[in-house]
């Protein structure tokens, strides 16, 4: 099996350098790499060129359209039997393609997704953000957990589709705001088999500060409403939970202002929830500092997503704004 690895890139030359360095270490070597520079001001042309002797890598520069359409640009030029999509802020374990190749031959998946994890080189903040995005107590395990809730939808930081899928379904029709979930829904609807490859993990850096993380998760909350506008039946009760949690915390603050008896119950519930996150993160990361930062990251994950969801639900669903 020959893989085409497609990486959209926008103003992140340092990230693509680190990602390509990990691809030079792959134990499975039947692959090409297509780097799609999406109208960047800080381009990575010279960095990509420095890997020409180590990788079958091609560099393309195109006008800025967003990551979804940049992946389509790569699909159109890919030679592989299977297209693998990575975000530029990922590090790829050396046995990644070997694991994927073996799994696909044994299970015959038309499309797949894999989990993400925190690399040992990540900062404490990045490890806390990684926990918030993968914990069963925050995202319910939907981002690559074996026991995820509901139908599995691969995420574009670590996703693969067969050439047969692309030829029948096409590429992305959204360039952002939930484009990967929308794409996987169409793959499902066309009768293709999608599955999780549990061991095909990547190390996903995500954001390096809590302010950047807030902006990203607020965007994700809005993206869920964007997906709903295309596929109304996909909006489930579980997608409202961050909004309910956000409204609950706002209510708790208001109850404390007025010193009502109900405030003590709400305070206790909030305290118990974040204590659960603290001790769970401490157990996983073996660090009190990361456990404390995980509480902050989880609070941001819930409230940022919840506020983004509420904002666009109010505007686009209640008031029908485009």
Image: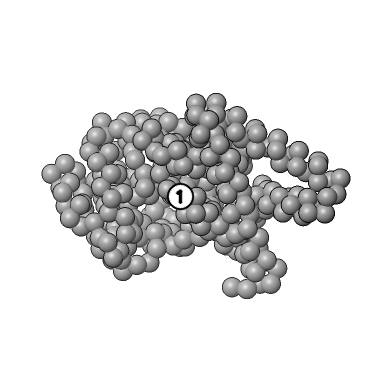
Residue 126 visible in rendering? yes
221 relative to 53 in the view: left or right:
right
59 or 100, which is in the foreground?
A: 59
Q: How many marks?
A: 1
Label 1: element kind: loop
Q: In which quarter of the image is residue 223?
A: bottom right
**Measured along the vertical axis of the image, is residue 92 above or below residue 179?**
above
Rendering coords of residue 126 (x, y %): 44, 42
Mark 1 crowd level (few <14, some 14–19, many ≥20, 10 Å Cα): few
Residue drawn at the location 39% of the way across and 38% of the way down: 122
237 or 22, which is in the foreground?
A: 22
Quadrant into which the C terminus falls: bottom right
**Measured along the vertical axis of the image, is residue 187 above or below residue 308?**
above
Residue 110 visible in rendering? no
Rendering coords of residue 31 (x, y %): 25, 42
Residue drawn at the location 55% of the way across and 44% of the way down: 297
Residue drawn at the location 49% of the way across and 54% of the way down: 211
Rendering coords of residue 285 (x, y %): 49, 29
Which residue of the protein is positioned furthest toward the right in this rendering? Answer: 261
Rendering coords of residue 263 (x, y %): 81, 46
Residue drawn at the location 24% of the way across and 34% of the way down: 25
228 or 121, which is in the foreground?
A: 121
Q: How is the image coloured?
A: one colour
Q: Please give the residue where the numbered disc 1 appears in the rendered image.
A: 209
């Amino acid at each position: 099996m020959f893989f085409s690895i497609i990486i959209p890139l926008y103003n992140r030359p340092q990230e693509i350098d680190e990602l390509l360095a990990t691809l030079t270490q792959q134990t499975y070597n039947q692959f090409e790499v297509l780097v799609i520079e999406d109208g960047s001001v800080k381009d990575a042309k010279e960095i990509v060129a420095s890997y020409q002797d180590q990788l079958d890598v091609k560099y393309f520069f195109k006008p800025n359209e967003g990551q979804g359409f940049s992946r389509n640009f790569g699909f159109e030029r890919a030679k592989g039997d299977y297209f693998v999509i990575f975000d530029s802020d990922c590090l790829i374990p050396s046995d990644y393609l070997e694991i994927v190749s073996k799994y696909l031959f044994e299970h015959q998946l038309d499309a797949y997704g894999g989990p993400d994890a925190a690399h040992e080189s990540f900062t404490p903040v990045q490890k806390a953000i990684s926990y918030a995005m993968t914990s069963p107590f925050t995202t319910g395990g939907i981002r690559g957990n074996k026991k995820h809730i509901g139908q599995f939808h691969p995420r574009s930081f670590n996703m693969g589709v067969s050439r047969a899928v692309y030829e029948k379904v096409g590429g992305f029709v959204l360039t952002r705001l939930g484009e990967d979930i929308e794409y996987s829904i169409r793959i499902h609807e066309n009768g293709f088999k999608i599955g999780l490859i549990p061991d095909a993990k990547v190390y996903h850096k995500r954001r390096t500060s809590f302010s950047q993380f807030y902006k990203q998760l607020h965007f994700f909350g809005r993206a869920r409403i964007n997906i709903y506008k295309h596929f109304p039946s996909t909006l489930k009760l579980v997608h409202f939970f961050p909004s309910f949690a956000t409204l609950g915390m706002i209510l708790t603050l208001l109850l404390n202002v007025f010193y009502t008896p109900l405030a003590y119950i709400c305070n206790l519930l909030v305290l118990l929830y974040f204590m659960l996150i603290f001790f769970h993160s401490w157990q996983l990361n073996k660090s009190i500092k990361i456990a404390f930062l995980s509480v902050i990251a989880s609070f941001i994950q819930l409230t940022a997503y919840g506020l983004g969801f509420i904002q666009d639900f109010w505007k686009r669903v209640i008031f029908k704004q485009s």
